[in-house]
Image: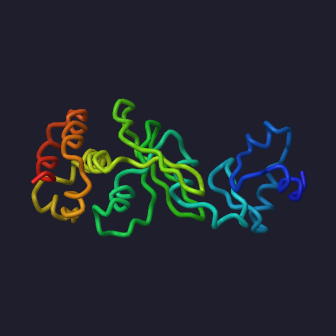
Amino acid sequence: MKYNTLNVAVQGPVFTRNDLALSGHKVLDYQFSLWVKKGYLLRLKKGIYAFSRDRDKLRGEGIAFLLYQPSYLSLESALAWYGFIPEIVYAYTSVTARITRTFENAWGRFIYRHVKSDLFWGYVEMKTEHGPYLLAEPEKALLDYFYFNLARINTEDDFDSIRLNEEEMEKTLDKNKFLRYSQAFGVKKMERWVRRCLR
């Protein structure tokens, strides 16, 4: 297959090797490697590519969704999105019901943290001109953060070191939903920090 044929065969900015195979096109490994080396394509992960010319049409949030499904953005990524933490987040952190994984590509680092399937909920679909992705609700993002970081949140000083923006939380959190969601986790140690957020 020639690169010009690939241009005609693929409509969107992102495609997979399976997409090409299903449409009857055969591309050899060395061709993908050559097109990446020449700068025509960007490799998102094994088997998933984007056209370099379309780089501005893609956002990290959408790529996080494409790389590993099912998953939704949560933890530091969602907390920063809601303005609950002051830090600029340099990785896209998601929650998944699959095994923990990490990927790196031209858009950054993508971290996927495993959660048992009965805690895989509490997210909304975000639709953008660049494609959809899933984002934790503010209540679930905060609870996910506590859940994955409980081992290092033992004292008030540990809690204060998270530097949560209490004003933003007061405006954004649905307190009844936050309490209801926290009970679904069934983790006794989380209760202290949930109450601390509701002061």
| 18 with respect to 77 (left or right) | right
User: Residue lying furthest top in this view?
Assistant: 118
Q: Residue at x 78, y 55 (%)?
A: 32
| 120 with respect to 181 (left or right) | right
The quarter of the displayed image where residue 19 is located: top right
- The image shows residue 79 at horizontal and vertical percentages of 33, 58
Q: Residue at x 61, y 60 (%)?
A: 58
Q: How many marks?
A: 0
- The image shows residue 195 at horizontal and vertical percentages of 11, 47
- The image shows residue 134 at horizontal and vertical percentages of 47, 47
Colouring of the image = rainbow
| 2 with respect to 147 (left or right) | right
Asked if 57 appears above or below 173 in the picture, the reply is below
> Which quadrant of the rendered structure holds the C terminus?
bottom left
Q: Residue at x 34, y 53 (%)?
A: 75
| 194 with respect to 105 (left or right) | left
- The image shows residue 44 at horizontal and vertical percentages of 63, 55
Q: Residue at x 43, y 50 (%)?
A: 73
